[in-house]
Amino acid sequence: MCRMSQPPNNRSSAPGPSRPDASMSLLTHVMDHSLDEGYAEASARRAAEGTAGLPRTLKAKLALAAGLVLAAMVVTLGAAQARIEAPVLAKEREELIDRVERANADADGLEKEIESLRTDVSGRQRAALKQHGGDQGELVALLSGATEVRGPGLKLVVDDAKDAEQGGGGPRESAGFSDTGRVRDRDMQRIVNGLWQAGAEAVSINGQRLTSLSAIRAAGDAILVDNKPLVPPYEVLAVGEKNRLRTDFQDSVDGQYLHVLQENYGIRYTVSTEDDVRLPAASSLTVRTAEPKKGAS
């Protein structure tokens, strides 16, 4: 019984270590053969035929030279044209700037003229109120806002809540403003009406004198007084008997309403009495006259 011999265990015949990039065969093939085989074959064929590289015939060389000269001429003409047009564009730009500046100067002059005419008209209106008011001319001028007012009174500063910009829900959100902590036009209306009922002789908000024809309303998120926007905090000044004015306002329904705004919505306000309060005259007045009907008793 014979036994078949086993081949010797020769470790040297084992395959060598694999390449580190063996798992990236596709990427390796792309890197090693960056030029497509079709392009490589075409390039080799042109080299074999002698048609590769620069043209060899005189006619082809002349055509190439003509093309280069034409391209150079186009570039040169374009550069020259741009150089010629640059001063023209700069001149047009300066003329446009001068026109804008002249228009702005004319607009400023017109605004000054309008302001001067408005001041003249307001002065004539105030003089007419004093002249035709009879023995109550001063009272008429005071109630209509035609004259400046100075005396003791009340200072009320109302401001939005500290977190008013963060927004929030609540019943106040449904009537215009997107935030419950914002002071609204109806809040200022109630405050001013409460001051009138408490005995105020004259009232202003942020320097805007209020009259019987003044309007407090909203435009977007802004509060307007006679179509002029106001910025918080809102400083309300009222001329009158200061101690009584403060007590009557805080005890009134509107004063309690302001306190509720502070407790429920975080709206801030301070009330203080002042010995000397100055209110300017109203910026614009509307003079109206009334005449009795003929035959009326």
Image (tube, rainbow, N blue to C red):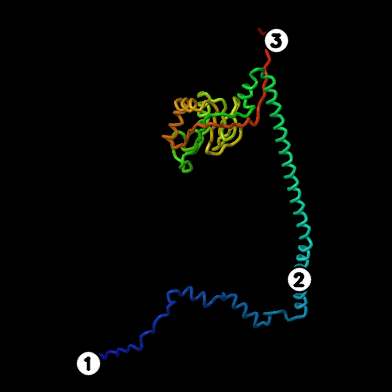
**Quadrant where the C terminus is found in the figure:** top right
Q: Three-letter amino acid code at disc 1?
A: Cys
Q: Secondary structure at mark 2?
A: helix
Task: Give the residue at mark 2.
Answer: 72
Q: Secondary structure at mark 1?
A: loop
Residue at the spot 27% in from the left edge and 89% down from the top edge: 6
Task: Give the residue at mark 3.
Answer: 294
Establish if 102 lies above or below 140.
below
Q: At which x and y percent is residue 123? A: 70, 29
Mark sitting earlier along the chain (3/1): 1
Distance (Cα) linking label 3 and label 2: 97 Å
Hey, which quadrant is residue 253 in on the image?
top left
Q: Secondary structure at mark 3?
A: loop
Q: At which x and y percent is residue 104? A: 72, 45
**Quadrant where the N terminus is found in the figure:** bottom left
Mark sitting earlier along the chain (3/2): 2
Q: At which x and y percent is residue 3? A: 23, 91
Nearest to the observer: residue 177 or residue 191: 191
Q: Three-letter amino acid code at disc 2?
A: Ala
Mark sitting earlier along the chain (1/2): 1
Q: Three-letter amino acid code at disc 3?
A: Lys
Residue at the spot 75% in from the left edge and 42% down from the top edge: 106
Residue at the spot 46% in from the left edge and 43% down from the top edge: 166
Q: At which x and y percent is residue 101? A: 74, 48
Nearer the observer, disc 1 or disc 2?
Answer: 2
Residue at the spot 46% in from the left edge and 26% down from the top edge: 247
Instruction: Kindly give the residue lying farthest to the bottom in the view shown.
Output: 2
Q: Please give left or right for residue 70 compared with residue 172 in the image.
A: right
Task: Give the residue at mark 1.
Answer: 2
Q: Are marks 3 and 2 in contact (CB under 8 Å)?
A: no
